[in-house]
Amino acid sequence: MTTTGFPQAARQALQDPTLRRNLDQATSTIRAKRDSAVRELPDWPELRDSGAAIKARALATLPEQLVRLEQMVTAAGGTVHWARDAAEANALVAGIAHRHRATEVVKVKSMATDEIRLNDALAATGIDVVETDLAELIVQLAGDRPSHILVPAIHYGRTEIRSLFERTIASGDALPDDPEALAEVARLYLRRRFLSARVAVSGANFAVADSGTVCVVESEGNGRFCITLPDVLITVMGIEKVLPEWRDLEVMLQLLPRSATGERMSPYTSLWTGTRPNDGPTQFHLVLLDNGRTRALADEVGRDALRCIRCSACLNVCPVYSRTGGHAYESVYPGPVGAVLSPQIFGLEAAATLPWASSLCGACYEACPVKIDIPSLLVHLRGQIVHELPGHAPERIVMRSLARVFASERLFARAQRLARVGRGPLAKFPPPLVSRWTAMRDLPLVAQQTFREWWRERENEAGHL
Amino acid sequence: MRIALFVTCVTDTLFPDTGRAVVGLLERLGHEVTFPTGQTCCGQMHVNAGYAREALPLVRRFLRDFGDADTVVSPSASCTALVRAHYPQLAEEAGDNGLARESRDLASRLFELSELLIDVLAVEDVGAFYPHRVTYHSSCHGLRTLNLGDRPLRLLRAVRGIEVIELPEASECCGFGGTFAVKNADVSMAMLSDKVRHVVNTGAEACVATDNSCLMQIGGALRRQRAGVRAIHLAEILAQTP
């Protein structure tokens, strides 16, 4: 994917009135639902503390947890594979699918497989991938990209979905403009796929090391079709999704639905442990995906981003995301947490503008169920980028000079006097950076008498009394 | 009480009226205000832009200027938040444990204006008079880092003659964010448009906040639009008397 950087891409998005309206409506609706679901629980702050502690413990003991998970899954009849990066994971999944002579796989909505672009990789080997989450299906049919972690088609309105279905799965029929009828069209299309597919691919919300149990949380039940009907189930899971103990789910399954969809519990919470005779898939493959995660784990500050449970609460409360939408981030992980995950997973160069896609207002941190201090992580990544990537030398020089001026009372006072003289011409003929301010706002006046000048005058007068 | 004023570089240079208001208000309440003249800038812009290392001399300078003060007050929520929430960590990252200890110690003696008035001086009614309709924007760092809660509003509501109108979406960021306003100018403007629309719709004559950087953003747009609404710092309202 070619990228233009966030400021450019955001500028495009901001000029689309339909997008702005769809986003505003969707994010404010989810925000209100989340707020009331959270307010119900008097121990929400303690739950967040527990969630953060559970994930921190899992990350601090990751090697042990993953080995334990492998042991338990294997003991329960599953097979565990380890993938260093996207290419390895894709090759593993394609290999398994081809061994079962699959020409089609059904997919449960999953971020990890979006991250590694599994659909493209499978298509390249001749396998047809069907997304079964309604919103993912909409995005797939439109040849579009998801724009939200949880609600991939958040940028679509009902009428756009109707005409999309008319063009694609409704085979030319005119459709009514109501959500139930549209959902029915998708339902009929998907049911046929569930019955014919022999291989399914899923992600995982959690995996319990102690029991070897994998957990997927979803709203539609389409995921449950995928993980129960086909003969072979392949789960691709980021290694940071592991939880040490079964009881950890008690906390996480309260935090996730309330933060994500504003529900007390998601309609479908599926848990499975390996395979079972005459019940569900006969083969279960678990692909453990690193893809940059161990590198992030090695960063003492950045590692906190690995606590993320992909609930999207930070997207919905973010004043930036709720105006630009997800495409502006040019990453499968958009929004505040995307701005800290993307540079760490895909590399600083691949997401070099994202850490600045925030006013550091802190709404994300406040909403995060596992207390990721996203503003601090953004600042940390900014520091890495300005000091390590090329192209930041001019800014570094300016900032160093400014630091020198600010560090000296004498130079600072002189700069103030200079600003007083320079303000007039700056306001009249604003240079590029200043014009970005004056495009919409007046330039503040530099006071005729600064505070420190006033103070000195007052002291002098008092001294003379 | 003897209170040292940390006026901040933005207020010093662009909004000295706020600094004078803090001095006037605290003296009226019977306190002595000092102004350590060596003070410059806390380094917030540097730190938030990723130049924490470069900001270290500013941290040292700040501690030298204010280290001896019993109580420090600042009319900026975000500068107070930087010193309180980030100085100790910056010092630790630089491997200077002494500096970290000093900054933690200073953080416990540094207060944003509404904190000082309500928590330390225990006043809500400062005897101010401001016969105007106002609305209050809760600056992000005041709201989420300092947890100011309704302290500024309690001070405002105790002002004689005032009418405080609730601002819709008051807790949403105004879009300033330091360098964000120019690095992501388009998003900043989109956020500012909504903020200013909400402010104007309240019918208030003034938009009040606890941070002059937010007020520079909101006020800059209000003036540009000739909206007839002024942006004003809380201190300047509290300093007014009949």
Image (cartoon, coloured by chain):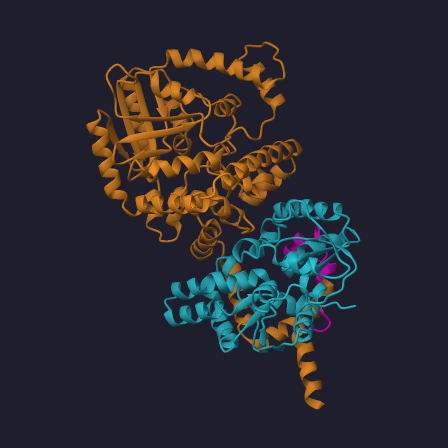
Q: Residue A278: percent from the left, percent from the top?
A: 26, 14
A446 drawn magenta: yes
Q: Is residue B44 toward the left or the right of residue B204 in the image?
A: left
Residue A97: which quarter of the image?
top left
Residue at 38% x, 19% y is A226
Q: Residue A131: percent from the left, percent from the top?
A: 44, 22
Q: In front here: A438 or A45?
A: A45
B51 drawn magenta: no
**Residue A191 appears in the figure:** yes
Q: In front here: B167 or A342?
A: B167
A375 relative to A25, above or below: below
Chain letter for the part of the structure drawn in orange: A
A92 relative to B180, above or below: above
Chain letter for the part of the structure drawn in cyan: B
Residues drawn in magenta: A426-450
Q: Residue A63: percent from the left, percent from the top?
A: 25, 43
